[in-house]
Image (cartoon, rainbow, N blue to C red):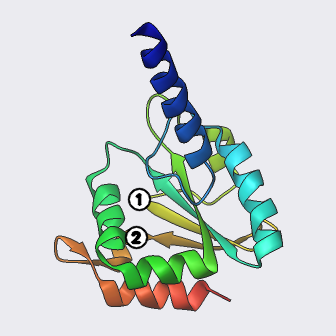
Amino acid sequence: MKRVAAVVVCWVLATLAWAAIPGDVEVFDPGRDAAQDISRAVAEAKQSGRRILLDVGGDWCSWCHILDRMFKQNADLSELRERHFIWVKINKSPENNNEAVLARYPKIKGYPHIFVLDRDGRLLHSQDTYQLEEGKSYSKERIRAFLVRWSN
C-alpha cells in the first residue's frame, strides 16, 4: 500500500511539474519563480512568434477568478489568446509579492492587471482590467478587442 501511495505521489508531482509551463499555469502560485517563468515565456515567444501576457493577481482576488472563468467559458476567447500569446500568471500576495519582477513594470492600481510584452520581453502595454469589465463580469467583446489589438 505504501508503494502505491508513493507512486501516486510521484505521478502527481510529475504531472504538476509538467503542467507548470508558462501559458499552462492555471493558478496564482506564490511558490513560483516569476522571473524564471517570464524568461521561459520569452524563449517560447521567440520560437513561436507569439507575444506574452502577464496576468498579475492572486487566488485571493475575486476578479481574477472571474477573468479565468470568462476564458474557460468562452472557447473562442481562449483559442484567440493561445494562438497569439503566452499567458503567464504572476502571483501578488502576502506570501510572495514578486516585488523585484514587478518593479520592472508600471505601478499597478488594481487586480487582475495585464502587461503585454513583445517576443523579446519588452513592455508594450499596461492594461487595467477594470476597463474590460461589464457589470459583475467582463465584457467578452472588450476582451476580444484587447486581444486582437495586441496580437500583432
- Residue assigned mark 1: 112
Position of 147 compared to 17: left or right?
left
Camera-nearest residue between 67 and 126: 67
For residue 66, which quarter of the picture? bottom left
The residue shown at (58%, 35%) is 14
Under mark 1, the amino acid is Pro
Where is 39 relative to 122, above or below?
Answer: above
As drawn, the label of residue 129 is 2
Q: Position of residue 1 (x, y in %)?
A: 39, 10
Residue 119 visible at all:
no
Residue 2 visible at all:
yes
Position of 67 compared to 54: left or right?
left
Under mark 2, the amino acid is Thr
Spatial distance from mark 2 to mark 1, Cα to Cα?
Answer: 6 Å
Q: Position of residue 6 (x, y in %)?
A: 49, 16
Instruction: Report helix, strand or loop for mark 1.
Output: loop
